[in-house]
Image (cartoon, rainbow, N blue to C red):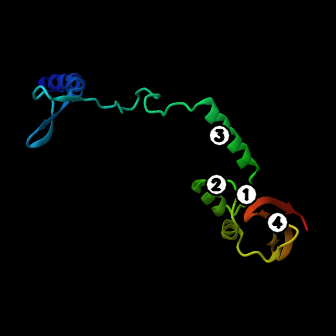
Amino acid sequence: MKTLLAVTGLLILWPAISVADIYRCESDTGVRFADTPCGDQSEKVILQDNRIGGNFGQNLPDRPDPEQRQTSETARERSDNDTCQFINSTDLRRYLIREQVVKGMTRENVQDAFGRPPETYPTPQETWVYQTKYFGALTELTYVYFRDGCVENVVYRKP
């Protein structure tokens, strides 16, 4: 019973112990940190509260000016028109494992997913054609269209 009371007392006092102030003291021997002020030149160190469940907004950067927001929106519109889009590594790995090709992949990514193309056509637009066969019968043709080295479109057709 006494042990239970001692443990309960420690648990109640633990937050008070862990919120002690920290002071930075400079002397001839160097800098040291203490929990009590060590003279007139001691400086209180302020630590950010990084405990889970704290204030979500305390570590966020300042909001950008409206002018900066407009320029970032125009840059985003330009990137939407671009065929090369960023594909994060997790999604890229998932596509390659599933042997899928999506808009924005590079030639190397397509070769990793589908293998070397049996047919390629450089003009009017670079196109790679893949054949899907089941039990020796041709069941599907996959056309991969590139623009500037990145996949612009993928079309699946029946032969």
**Residue bearing mark 1:** 102
Q: Could you say which is closer to the camera, residue 66 or residue 80?
A: 66
Q: Which residue is found at the position 81% from the left and 72% from the top?
A: 133
Residue 146, given in percent of the width and then of the height, sits at 78, 64
Of the numbered discs 4 and 1, the one sitting upstream in the chain is 1
Position of 151 with respect to 33 (left or right) is: right
Q: Is residue 152 above or below residue 19?
A: below
Q: Could you say which is closer to the camera, residue 101 or residue 73?
A: 73
Q: Name which quarter of the figure residue 8 lies in.
A: top left
Residue 129, given in percent of the width and then of the height, sits at 82, 71
Q: Name which quarter of the figure residue 104 lies in.
A: bottom right
**Residue bearing mark 2:** 87
SS type, badge 4? strand
Q: Are marks 4 and 2 in contact (CB under 8 Å)?
A: no
Of the numbered discs 1 and 2, the one sitting upstream in the chain is 2
How many marks overall? 4
Q: Are marks 1 and 2 in contact (CB under 8 Å)?
A: yes
Which label sits on residue 74?
none
What amino acid is found at the position of numbered circle 4 in the picture?
A: Thr
Q: Which residue is found at the position 18% from the left and 26% from the top?
A: 10
Disc 3 versus disc 4: nearer the observer: 3
SS type, badge 2? loop
Q: Give the crowd class for mark 3: few <14, some 14-19, many >=20 residues within 10 Å.
A: few
Question: Looking at the image, which residue sits at the far right?
Answer: 159
Report how far apart the C-alphas of labels 3 and 2 lie in the structure. Answer: 19 Å
Which label sits on residue 72?
3
**Residue bearing mark 4:** 142
Report how far apart the C-alphas of labels 3 and 4 lie in the structure. Answer: 36 Å
